[in-house]
Amino acid sequence: MTSTAPITGSIPLPSSAEGSSTSSVDNSGRNRLVIALMLAATFVVFLNETSLVVAIPGIMEDLNIQPSTAQWLSTSFMLTMAVVIPITGFLIQRFTTRSIFIAAMSLFTAGTLLGAIAPTFVLLIVGRVVQASGTAIMLPLLMTTVMTLVPPATRGKTMGNVSIVMSMAPAVGPTVAGLVLAVFDWRWVFIVMIPISVTALVLGITKVRNVTDPRKVSIDILSVILSAIAFSGLIYGLSSLGESASGDVLIAPAIPIAAGAVSLVLFIIRQLALQKTDRALLDLRTFAAPGFAVSISLMMIMMAALFGTIILLPMFTQDVLGLEPILSGLLVLPGSLVMGVLGPIVGRLYDKVGPRPLMIPGAIVVSASLWSFTMLSETSSPFMVVAIHIPMSIGLAFMFTPLFTSALGALKPHLYSHGSATIGTVQQLAGAAGTALFIALLTVQSVALAADESSETHALAGGVQLAFMAGGIISLFAIVLTFFVKRNSTETAPSDAPIAH
């Protein structure tokens, strides 16, 4: 590829015809509208990543499929996200904000409609893949737009809203679906989303204006192939670890994990070579930026804890405590809502005090909550789950907003799109890894206890305890890493200054 601009101009910056968001008061309203629409749309599409989990029993009965087949409703979504997200860095540079938004919401709407009317499981899977293609584009587009339009000194507040999308939407998805399924059948999990997604699409067509200048770039096909094999292989392999622990798996997880790992190494080598001429699909110079690698590492730990908890708590409350799915979902709703409410508040605090005064106590609270979950047993009260989950949600809220803001804020503007794509990819990998770790340990321990003639509920409770203990151990590393997160030089952080020395 022959770039039409030097590397410092490779990010699509605010259009000169319309003015920069930081220099023209006239454009502030337009910029706020664009970001608000993207936030709402991204929340809706990310809600679907986990919402269908509680509908799987109804789908299995209606379409006459086995559990091993039904799990592809979640796996296909994650695999598609893993394949598409690394390409978004190219898409954001090549096309306008408006066209990408319209394409993403069109894909999501079409996939949702197909899922609602799908007469067969194959078409339902196709609908999920199309849905995921649109979802994968939205988050990197949102993050890149925020970093481009919002001044560094006030990014925390806006990134607090972004954290709601990344953390609250997946957490609240099963609860929303549970409420829908209490009245309607599984197709309504798709149907209720159609008017919302159509509204977002229409608003995007009529209200979203181009806020960036795209440039002509080419895409390296070999990089696309390598990234697809690498990230889909790793996520599929990790997602299969839990099934492998119980012996219910078609392909040994080691095979896709090994293929993914080898492809990832080749992908990294390819990107290191291509980025010298500004041709990388996913520019890895993001990791050379001070603080980005630390923030990404922390993000992986927190996302693994979040997704592991999302998958584990419903299993505990339903299979051990014997609660109905709707009550199980309502137990985690208060924590999810608290996380959402705190997002913008933590963002404002970040703008004033910087990351470490927020992240250090946040990491400690998350770690304490994970260790507290190890005390759950078959005699525990459901209110104990709520009492632990709410503080954990508060701790995560104090982690995610500073992490997103400091990670992307550490980058130069021409790397914003690549940094956003990296964060989206890490979210999927960490979610799969956290789910795999928690489920594998749960399965191994419960099988071992059951072999000792323990009751089924006691064995499952023991598995839950072991899984959360592993999460607690990993969280200790997160506490240490928070001390190495620094505020970026473009922001003012008086409270961080003494710590930096």
Image (cartoon, helix red, strand yellow):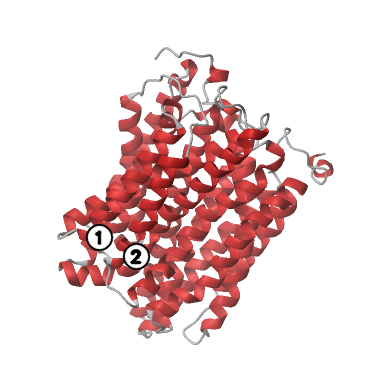
Q: Residue at x 31, y 61 (%)?
A: 190
Q: Nearer the viewer, mark 2 or mark 1?
A: 1
Q: CA distance from mark 2 to mark 1?
A: 15 Å
Task: Indicate which disc residue 129 carries.
Answer: none
Q: Secondary structure under badge 2?
A: helix
**In this view of the protein, can residue 159 be seen by the observer?**
yes
**Image location (x, y in percent) of residue 501:** 82, 39
**Image location (x, y in percent) of residue 107:** 31, 45
Label 2, residues with CA under 10 Å away: few <14, some 14-19, many ≥20? some
Viewer-nearest residue: 488 or 165: 165
Viewer-nearest residue: 327 or 233: 327
Q: Amino acid at mark 1?
A: Ala
Please give left or right for residue 296 compared with residue 221 in the image.
right
Task: Indicate which disc residue 116 carries.
Answer: 1
Q: Amino acid at mark 2?
A: Val
**Image location (x, y in percent) of residue 333:** 51, 71
Q: Residue at x 42, y 26 (%)?
A: 94
Q: Specify the quadrant that holds the N terminus.
A: top left
Q: Secondary structure under badge 1?
A: helix
Residue of label 2: 53
**In this view of the protein, can residue 253 be seen by the observer?**
no
- The image shows residue 322, relative to residue 289, as above or below, that is below
Please give left or right for residue 255 compared with residue 486 in the image.
left
Viewer-nearest residue: 87 or 344: 344
**Image location (x, y in percent) of residue 291:** 64, 37
